[in-house]
Amino acid sequence: MKIYRPTYVKDFKCNGKACASRCCRDWKISLDEATRQKFSTLPDRADFFKHVDAPAQAFKMQSSGACPFLNENFLCKLQLKHGEDFLPAICQSFPRVTYKLSEEIFTQSMTLTCPVAEILILLRGEPITFEVVNNLSARQIFNVTGKFSEPEKFLERQQAAIKILQRRDLSINLRLKNLCEFFGENISDLDAQNNAETLTEIFSEMYKANLSAEKKAHLAAIYRVNQENILAQLHENFSVVLENYLVNEFFMRLYPCAFKGDEKLNCRVFVRTYRAIEFAAVLTAISRARLTLEDFLELLCALSDKFNHSRRD
């Protein structure tokens, strides 16, 4: 077994106090069969199953949206009492994202929807590095074996693309241009300057805002007027954060095979998704009259959550 992963995965330590346990609230927490069987053998099993919605095989969340096993210190009562092995697979695995590419080849990364993982990934000064290990540290695994006839060749091509994204001698825009050329795509019609209207449509769809044509035109006009100055500041102040974001997204979402279609289409989706982040950053900077590092990390975390819940193959 080979698990390809960024080296940051081994450094992750869950700290509910640092993030108020965002992963333990406002989500559906599913109960897998293996965990259900473990708790069925315990003397205090009734105390556990009274919090389980049997038809949905998921926990009954509190009125606040929090998990019924989250204590006042933002720690998990199940883990404190029984250990990590008794956590549901989704809880034991999060924020790890693990894909099975073949019987022997897996990838593992982490999602930015966990604030602790976000800081670990985005605020590292050195480029993200990768390793191959033989021990799989997550029970929730997404089987995507049907996507890949030659997974090792896919990973080689993916790593070649990541090296382009890590070219610190180039601007972010030049890296994206080189990435598109690597996959045979033309970036000219993906430039942010020419796509204010398209980005407004993407933004409206992401947030299900149902904006009127007049409102969309207004947002596009605001973006065109302000984007050059604000994006210049964004690229100057947060270039390392942007690089780490792009690398993590490219690896975690299995680009250039993230979506149905060829590599050129996947490259187009990747760049346009990034342009949507720039669009949101510009609007955030205008509305708050600033764009601090904290503002930008908050934005990336929120958008990652949106992308995770709106993804379509």
Image (cartoon, helix red, strand yellow):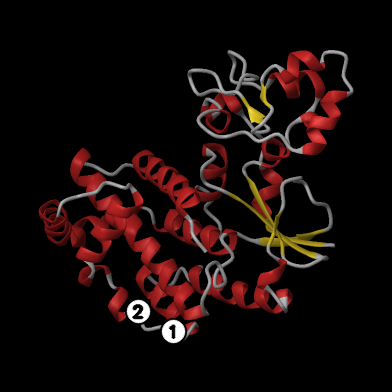
Q: Position of residue 205 (x, y in %)?
A: 32, 54
Between 236 and 262, the one lying in front of the other is 262
Q: Is residue 263 left or right of residue 6?
A: left
| Residue designated by label 1 | 181
Measured from the top left, where is residue 171 in percent x and y? 37, 69
Quadrant of res 59: top right
Q: Is residue 229 left or right of residue 207?
A: left
Figure label count: 2
The quarter of the picture where residue 186 lies is bottom left
Tag 2: amino acid: Ile
Mark 2 — residue? 187
Q: Residues within 10 Å of mark 1 (few under 14, many from 20)?
A: some
Rendered residue at 21%/72% (across/down): 194
User: Observer-nearest residue: 13 or 109?
Assistant: 109
Q: CA distance from mark 1 to mark 2?
A: 8 Å
Name the residue at 54% across, 23% down.
66
Please say if the residues under marks 1 and 2 sit with CB atoms less than 8 Å apart. yes
Comes first in the chain, label 1 or label 2:
1
